[in-house]
Amino acid sequence: MSCFSMVITTSAIQRNKASEGATTHKTQHNRITRTPVKLLLLGQSGSGKTTTLKHFKFTYAYRDEWAEERAAWRPVVFLNLVCNVNLVIEHLSAAMLNDKLAATAPDGSPKDTTSPSEAPLPSPKFTDEHQRLCTRLQDLIGVQLDLERCLGLAPPEIIHTAADAAPLDPEEAEPGILISEKREEESFNHWKDGWKAALGRLQTPTPREESSCSASLTDAENSGSSDSKPLFARPVGSRDSWEDDIAGTLNSLSEDIKLLWQDSTVQEVLERKSVWVQNMPGFFLDDSVRIASRYYRPADEDVLRAHIRTVGIQELKFTIESAPDEDGRIFVQNWYMYEVAIKRSSRAVWYSYFDDADAVLFLAPLSVFDEKVPDEPRMNRLEESYLLWGNLCSCDLLIRSHLILLLNKCHLLDAKLKRGIQIRDSVPSYGTRANDFQTATKYFQQHFKEIARRKSPVQRPFYMHLTSEINSKSTAVIVGIKPGLCVPTRVHCSTIHEARLGITCLMVEDNRFSLESAGTGASGY
Ligand SMILES: Nc1nc2c(ncn2[C@@H]2O[C@H](COP(=O)(O)OP(=O)(O)OP(=O)(O)O)[C@@H](O)[C@H]2O)c(=O)[nH]1
Ligand SMILES: [Mg+2]
């Protein structure tokens, strides 16, 4: 079976979008429709699933479609920035309070330490200006609530209580992972009709779907409607007016936000608490002045960097066409991609809905090796990825699907290691290996490979890539699963390349094309 992948850089895509009008001979050619491709995107929260979808949308949507989508992300960027500020203020206020308490304590000693065994550090130098900043920026708490309400964000995920919880699979039951299967199923039932309706739409294409190249990022939960929706619900009423109100508030606080983020004491407070805001999803503090300008409109890069948590299933459809071959044939192929944001406990229910998936793209961020799963403080995030990956590999229902493992956020991993963060402190099995990028990625790759070997009911190949999904200079997207896949005309490739061994990456950079066998990827087994 042959497989190949295509890696497209953002800059190349933009150039190609600029020349969209160039393909004018469609009607004179024989159009041959190929079997659709169905791709599943899985991975823990924040692993980069939506970002991957955005890459595809960015690649295949017409300019006006993308422009509309991009504009719709403006309030999400606002929300991300406001959350960044509120997080910083929270830590600053706590540190100032701690400082005050220490000053009034009988021995007058500051309480801040880097670790209990270390001597107390001298207190950071707080001034009245810090207090004033906290006061002036406190309006942003209300702004955050307004934005969340206006964006129609879903309530927090189901909270698993010990009372109604039971381990799903005794083999997998680990301390701190008690999950209510019943409540997950209720949640699943809430949106699975949307999934069925989505399938219905696939069977009766709308005129838009029949057009030569269309893309729509829709929310399967609301798929009873034929309109495509952006990734979140828009509020009723004049969107421009509430967005502009928020833009006005941000604009009036722009200078304070900048002062806050550039303040050395604030940086010291965050560092002591090991709060790396810059590594968190949706970090925009370095761009606060630009974003808080009254006429701000998101750039493509902002959209890739913005984060809003996906609930349920997101669907992206697009059609790609080959360039006409010598016989004047144009191959047309529909692609359906689904981001599945469901807890691991409900996999038994939902896997059956995807058993015909051609491939599963599993995203596992490597930079999270020292982070905990929110709401499950005893679980390491890398450990969660291992669990999810093991579940996927062992699933009989998905046995026919190709597995592509993207070890994502590599540049963040590199940055953490360069800051001196020791992997062995969070991953004891790492032992005394060198704490560098190469050794670490080799170790993590080996671990994922080993899980696949142990858990797969039958031995099958899978493909592994090191990626940075928001780094447009490196791997951006991977497409192309089936033999004979159409190569989109938009990237001006007229040849279909088949890989002899595993995955081949088609590199498109600065108008130059090259094929790289496996690139940063590696096959399993
Ligand atoms: N620095 C960095 N950030 C990334 C990378 N890939 C994704 N992100 C960011 O990580 C955040 C989360 O990415 P998403 O694509 O929304 O993650 P997701 O898997 O869809 O998350 P949920 O919908 O919450 O399950 C976003 O702010 C992205 O911009 C990466 O390679 N490097
Ligand atoms: Mg998502």
Image (cartoon, grey):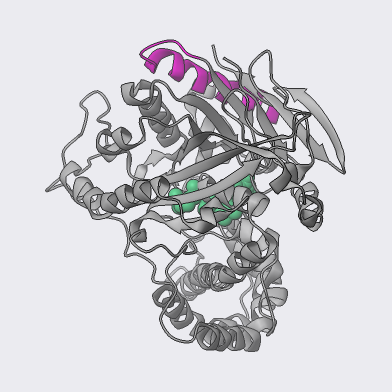
Q: Which residue lies furthest to the left in this view?
A: 163
Image quarter in which the N terminus is found: top right
| Viewer-side residue, 43 vs 399 | 399
Image spot of residue 216 (x, y percent): 53, 56
Position above or below: 525 against 478: above
Residue at image position (35%, 28%) is 391
First to last magenta residue range: 431-460
Could you tell me which quadrant the C terminus lies in?
Answer: top right
Q: Which of 277 and 45 is in front in this view?
A: 45
**Residue at image location 63% in from the left, 17% down from the top:** 502
x then y, percent, for residue 467 = 65, 37
Q: In which quarter of the image is residue 290?
A: bottom right
How many numbered markers are drawn? 0
Is residue 176 visible in the rendered structure shown here? no
Say which of 354 and 96 sits in front: 354
Q: Which residue lies furthest to the front in this view?
A: 28
**Is 434 included in the stretch rendered in magenta?**
yes
**Residue 486 falls within the magenta-colored stretch:** no
Residue 68: where, in percent of width, then height?
Answer: 61, 69
Q: Mainly helix, strand or loop, the magenta region?
A: helix
Q: Where is residue 126 in the image (x, y as percent from the top left)?
A: 61, 76
Residue appearing at x 19%, y 51% in the figure: 186
Residue 438 is at least partly visible in this image: yes
In the visual, does 443 lie left or right of 148? right
Query: Relative to 247, is 91 above or below?
Result: above
Indicate left or right for 233 with 250 as reference.
left
Q: Is residue 372 above or below residue 298?
A: above
